[in-house]
Image (cartoon, grey):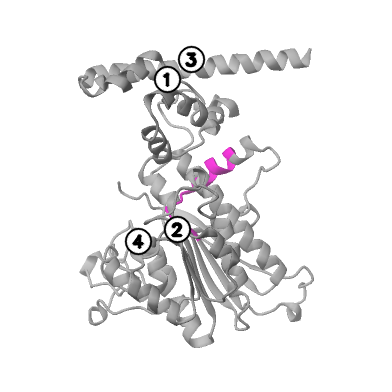
């Protein structure tokens, strides 16, 4: 799926103490926390905000809302639409690059280049903000993410390659870049040689070890979860994997002990992945998890008084919208009509499929009841048992999909009527 890229959210704030009203009281910035919700469009943020409010009316605003201040345009060096690699590379280095390039100078592409490029510099590695802060100012450095560690955005901060998919090139660079704190996915990608290097250089290394990470008191640590990527937040087993908020707090706690300050990048990686999968539940809930991580960073900055917090997506993805043409009368739909059923889903599409495929047929109905808020019809259950749905012609499937859509709408209407009756009874 192509990534939809236009004008995206930009937040750039410097938090100062409450008494810093006079110029002489303002402290210079010592720490920088960059938070990137990968693939997040403005519509994703809006839907997540509405969902949060619907589920908890005491929370009408996101943690980021008081600081929203503008938009930014991101792109590749030679194309208006950029993937995660060249866009975050630009944030890290100041230089737009090509699709798939990780903090590497692009080849010249003639008239296609959006800004002039120097052919003599093609394929040269570009120093990143993380690297510069460490080398020039002795700052501590950290990465927090929910994808695997050599994935585009974390790699953009700490590695260099003209091919984002070359994990065997990127992973060793990240390990040998001596980043102080790394927390995210990718257990299977960290080889024994890499782990041996980290251990020899004073790191605590934890693989799927939540208790170990929580107990670690070293200033240097790698903690990885999941064979590759971590689970979506709503699918996550909290006894096995930490939230992105917890990972952010852990990283800040360690990095803030450096007297020279620190640079930390936090990525809400899988908002983008859910967008690729057309999964609004994953998009909204993973963004809300990311917003809680933003809350942790903002809380630290308010208390610390010398920390800059920058919150900015690298690009937008999926073209999601709260209303659409074939949703007749969308401008008159109530909050219940829009968000009641949506709020009942307890898993992403991926998590739901894994759950259904892990239980016997006798338990499937209970899975739908528990995690989706509705039940399958006897006909649907029978098709699952017999697999006859795979043998149907396309036109038959279209008819059944239409019938199923009508059945869902009827179910919603019944639920609405029941709530109205309950409201009337309570008023009387």
| Alpha-carbon span between mark 3 and mark 4 | 47 Å
For discs 4 and 1, the disc positioned in front in the rendered view: 4
* Residue 120 shows up from this direction: yes
* Residue 94 shows up from this direction: no
Q: Position of residue 378 (x, y in %)?
A: 39, 14
For discs 1 and 3, the disc positioned in front in the rendered view: 1
Residue 281 counted in the magenta span: no
Q: Position of residue 280 (x, y in %)?
A: 45, 39
| Alpha-carbon span between mark 4 and mark 1 | 38 Å
N-terminal-most mark, 2 or 1 = 2
Out of 314 and 175, give the one closest to the viewer.
175
Residue 18 located left or right of residue 382 = right
Q: Are marks 2 and 4 in contact (CB under 8 Å)?
A: no
Residue 254 image-quadrant placement: bottom right
Label 3: few (<14), some (14–19) or many (≥20) C-alpha neighbours in 10 Å: few
In the rendered view, tell whether residue 373 sits above or below residue 181: above
For discs 2 and 1, the disc positioned in front in the rendered view: 2
Please report the residue visible at 52 percent of the width from the left and 29 percent of the height from the top: 370
Label 2: few (<14), some (14–19) or many (≥20) C-alpha neighbours in 10 Å: many
For discs 3 and 4, the disc positioned in front in the rendered view: 4
Mark identifier at residue 376 = 1
Task: Please identify the residue farthest to the bottom as the structure is shown.
Answer: 136
Q: Are marks 3 and 4 in contact (CB under 8 Å)?
A: no
Identify residue for label 4: 188
Mark identifier at residue 225 = 2
Identify residue for label 3: 410
Question: Magenta part of the protein: which range?
Answer: 36-51
């Amino acid at each position: 799926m192509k990534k939809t890229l236009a004008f995206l959210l930009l937040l750039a704030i410097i938090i100062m103490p409450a008494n810093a009203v006079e110029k002489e009281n303002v402290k210079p910035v010592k720490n920088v926390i960059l938070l990137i919700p990968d693939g997040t469009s403005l519509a994703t943020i809006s839907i997540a905000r509405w969902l949060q409010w619907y589920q908890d009316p005491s929370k009408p605003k996101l943690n980021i809302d008081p600081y929203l201040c503008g938009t930014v345009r991101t792109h590749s060096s030679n194309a208006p639409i950029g993937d995660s690699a060249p866009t975050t590379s630009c944030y890290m280095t100041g230089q737009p690059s090509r699709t798939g390039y990780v903090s590497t100078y692009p080849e010249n592409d003639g008239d296609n280049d959006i800004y002039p490029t120097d052919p003599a510099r093609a394929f040269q590695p570009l120093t990143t903000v993380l690297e510069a802060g460490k080398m020039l100012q002795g700052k501590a450095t950290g990465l927090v993410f929910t994808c695997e560690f050599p994935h585009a955005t974390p790699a953009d901060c700490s590695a260099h390659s003209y091919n984002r998919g070359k994990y065997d090139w990127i992973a060793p660079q990240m390990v040998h870049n001596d980043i102080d704190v790394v927390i995210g996915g990718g257990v299977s990608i960290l080889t024994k040689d890499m782990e041996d290097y980290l251990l020899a250089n004073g790191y605590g290394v934890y693989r799927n070890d939540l208790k170990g990470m929580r107990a670690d008191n070293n200033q240097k640590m790698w903690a990885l979860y999941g064979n590759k990527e971590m689970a979506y937040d709503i699918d996550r087993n909290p006894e096995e994997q930490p939230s992105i908020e917890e990972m952010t707090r852990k990283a800040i706690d360690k990095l803030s002990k450096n007297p020279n300050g620190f640079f930390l990048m936090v990525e809400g990686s899988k908002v983008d992945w859910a967008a690729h999968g057309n999964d609004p539940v994953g998009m909204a809930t993973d963004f809300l998890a990311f917003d809680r991580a933003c809350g942790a960073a903002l809380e630290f900055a308010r208390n610390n008084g010398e920390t800059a917090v920058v919150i900015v997506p690298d690009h937008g993805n999926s073209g999601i919208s709260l209303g659409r043409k074939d949703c007749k009368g969308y401008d008159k739909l109530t909050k219940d009509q829009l968000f009641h059923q949506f709020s009942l889903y307890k898993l992403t599409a991926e998590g739901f499929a894994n759950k259904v495929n892990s239980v016997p047929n006798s338990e499937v109905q209970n899975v739908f009841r528990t995690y989706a808020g509705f039940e399958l019809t006897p006909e649907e259950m029978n098709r699952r048992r017999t697999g006859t749905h795979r043998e149907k012609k396309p036109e038959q499937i279209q008819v059944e999909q239409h019938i199923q859509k009508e059945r869902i709408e009827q179910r919603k209407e019944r639920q609405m009527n029941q709530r109205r009756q309950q409201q009337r009874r309570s008023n009387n």
